[in-house]
Image: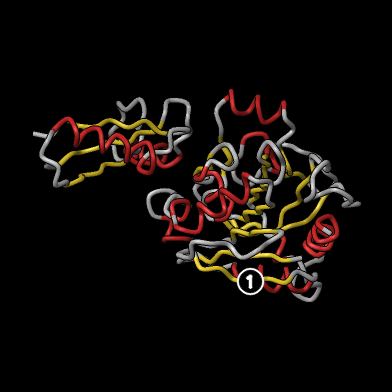
């Protein structure tokens, strides 16, 4: 399986993602934002970080970079595109997934482990994951998911919510919402579910000696689903 | 020609920064404030000399980059 990780000026989780993808069997290539063409890929990842210093709105500048037209075309033809953290912010700015990510409700940069509940398994990202709840890491200032009421209705009708913040037992309540996101939304799909944007970083959970293994579950499962 | 643009958050969008500014002003003794909303201001200097054309171009900029229409409104100020 071939993957590509796009590096924007200010990306800082691109190499972590490279390590994670390779660990679970992807042949990964790093792609510079100013390139015009994506290499042949089964998965494209927009990594976390602070592209363009978060100027104007997080992800807004990166969403207009040269490589993104190629990523949009890839996604439109059914290609798998995963956006993590700043990558999620870039995805909403391109319009590949609906909504926006606002400043965290309590104006703090949040950096901690959270639990998320998988809302939908009828997709290539979460199909066959045994667990209902995964422990991931979040580190963001703008992760407060927001959309209009009309968008929310559409998202819910199409089952586009991927994961919600919850407690370790999967209980989705306001007190387990770290950033004020509508409905505790931590990740969202496009309509066709080939594009996934999420705030948590699975690539930070691939080693027991460093953090945890729930990211390993995610990547192992993902590559199996793509084969 | 210089054209100015003001970007504001839509009515229903939470503005935590505006809220904190409100609270701070309140603490400073400005106690008659109903609400504070924070926005953005841009000044765009263009070589375009036709007023109408320049405004149309800036409107396109607003829609494509300067504002995110899910959460923000834009207002183009007439060039003087």
Visual colour scheme: secondary structure
Task: Reply above or below: A155 against A40.
Answer: above
Considering depth in this image, is B60 or A73 the residue closer to the camera?
A73
Residue at image coords 65%, 26%: A154
User: Where is residue A80 drawn, in percent x and y?
Assistant: 69, 52
User: Where is residue A27 drawn, in percent x and y?
Assistant: 72, 72
Q: Is residue A47 left or right of residue A58?
A: right
Chain letter behind tag 1: A
Task: Reply above or below: B75 against B64.
Answer: above
Residue A171 picture quarter: top right
Residue at image coords 51%, 45%: A94
User: Where is residue B28 drawn, in percent x and y?
Assistant: 30, 40
Residue at the extreme bottom: A209
Quadrant location of the C terminus of chain A in the rendered image: bottom right
Residue at image coords 8%, 34%: B80
Label 1 crowding class (10 Å Cα cut-off): few <14, some 14-19, many 20+?
some
Q: Secondary structure at mark 1?
A: strand
The residue labelled by disc 1 is A29
Q: Is residue A61 left or right of residue B47?
A: right
Residue at image coords 56%, 49%: A72
Task: Reply above or below: A218 against B43.
Answer: below
Residue A158 picture quarter: top right
Considering depth in this image, is A183 or A95 the residue closer to the camera?
A95
Residue at the extreme left: B80
Task: Reply above or below: A70 against B37.
Answer: below
């Amino acid at each position: 399986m071939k993957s590509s990780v796009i590096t924007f000026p200010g990306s800082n989780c691109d190499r972590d993602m490279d390590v994670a993808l390779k660990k679970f069997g992807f042949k990964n290539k790093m792609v510079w934002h100013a390139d015009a063409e994506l290499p042949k890929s089964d998965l494209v990842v927009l990594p976390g970080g602070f592209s363009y210093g978060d100027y104007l709105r997080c992800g807004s500048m990166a969403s207009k970079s040269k490589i993104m037209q190629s990523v949009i075309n890839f996604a439109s033809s059914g290609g798998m595109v995963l956006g993590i953290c700043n990558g999620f912010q870039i995805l909403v700015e391109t319009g590949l997934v609906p909504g926006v990510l606002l400043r965290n409700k309590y104006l703090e940069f949040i950096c901690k482990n959270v639990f998320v509940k998988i809302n939908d398994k009828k997709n290539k990202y979460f199909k066959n994951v045994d667990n209902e709840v995964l422990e991931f890491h979040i580190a963001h200032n703008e992760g407060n998911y927001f959309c209009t009421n009309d968008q929310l209705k559409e998202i819910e009708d199409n089952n586009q919510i991927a994961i919600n913040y919850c407690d370790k037992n999967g209980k989705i309540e306001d007190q387990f919402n770290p950033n004020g996101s509508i409905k505790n939304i931590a990740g969202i799909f496009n309509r066709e579910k080939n594009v996934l944007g999420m705030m948590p970083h699975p690539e930070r959970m691939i080693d027991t000696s460093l953090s945890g293994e729930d990211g390993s579950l995610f990547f192992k499962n993902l590559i199996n689903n793509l084969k | 020609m210089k054209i100015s643009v003001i970007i504001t958050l839509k009515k229903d969008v939470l503005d935590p920064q505006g809220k904190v500014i409100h609270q701070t002003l309140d603490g400073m003794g400005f106690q008659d404030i109903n609400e504070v909303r924070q926005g953005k201001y841009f000044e765009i200097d263009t070589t375009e000399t036709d007023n109408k054309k320049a405004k149309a171009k800036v409107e396109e900029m607003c829609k494509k980059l300067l504002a995110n229409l899910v959460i923000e409104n834009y207002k183009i100020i007439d060039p003087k």
